Amino acid sequence: MTEPFADVERVFADQMRAAMRRAGITQRRLAVLAAGTGLAPMYQSTINKINLGKRPIFLREAVFFASAFGLDLQELVRDRPVVWCATCKGDPPAGFVCATCNKGGAS
């Protein structure tokens, strides 16, 4: 019997690469953004290893990456393509809910 979370790091790596492409964020830029958050120093090579599934990811890093892409953490571990909303780009204005993807609502 296959364990239900056996592939979670591979799924995360796949979703992270897709999110980086959509957002136009390079590994180097992500490393710079991470440095400003108080995370332990993160280098482009570390992000590359995470992208390739060759390095485990810490929860605090996963939360940071989700935030950097404007996604919920759940979207980075879901084993299906993340649908990027063309209307709100995943970030509707505060207090509004996107009529296309239903994201938002918090002020």
Image (spheres, rainbow, N blue to C red):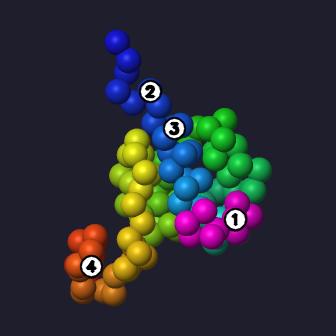
Q: Within 10 Å of the Cα at label 2, are there few (<14), some (14-19), or many (20+) other Cα atoms?
A: few
Indicate the amino acid at tag 4.
Answer: Cys
* Residue receiving disc 2: 6
Tell me where residue 16 appears, x and y as whole percent.
55, 53
Q: Within 10 Å of the Cα at label 3, are there few (<14), some (14-19), or many (20+) other Cα atoms?
A: many
Q: From what the image shows, is residue 64 above or below residue 8?
A: below
Residue sitting at 45 percent across and 69 percent down? Answer: 70
- Residue 34 counted in the magenta span: no
Q: Earlier in the sequence, mark 1 or mark 2?
A: 2
Q: Which of the 4 image quarters holds residue 75?
A: bottom left
Indicate the amino acid at tag 3.
Answer: Glu
Question: What's the magenta region?
Answer: 21-29
Q: Is residue 16 visible?
A: yes
Residue sitting at 37 percent across and 79 percent down? Answer: 87
Tag 4 and tag 2, C-beta contact below 8 Å: no
Indicate the amino acid at tag 2.
Answer: Ala
Q: How far apart are marks 1 and 2 (CA)?
A: 27 Å
Q: How many labels does the image show?
A: 4
Q: Distance between the residues labelled 4 and 1?
A: 27 Å
* Residue receiving disc 1: 26
Q: Earlier in the sequence, mark 4 or mark 2?
A: 2
Q: Which of the 4 image quarters holds residue 72?
A: bottom left
Residue farthest to the top, as pictured: 1
* Residue receiving disc 3: 9
Q: In the picture, which quadrant includes the N terminus?
A: top left
Q: Is mark 3 on a helix, strand or loop?
A: helix
Q: Nearer the viewer, residue 105 or 37?
A: 105
Identify the mark at residue 98; answer none if there is no mark: 4
- Mark nearer the viewer, 4 or 3: 4
Q: How far apart are marks 1 and 3 (CA)?
A: 20 Å
Tag 4 and tag 1, C-beta contact below 8 Å: no
- Mark nearer the viewer, 4 or 1: 4
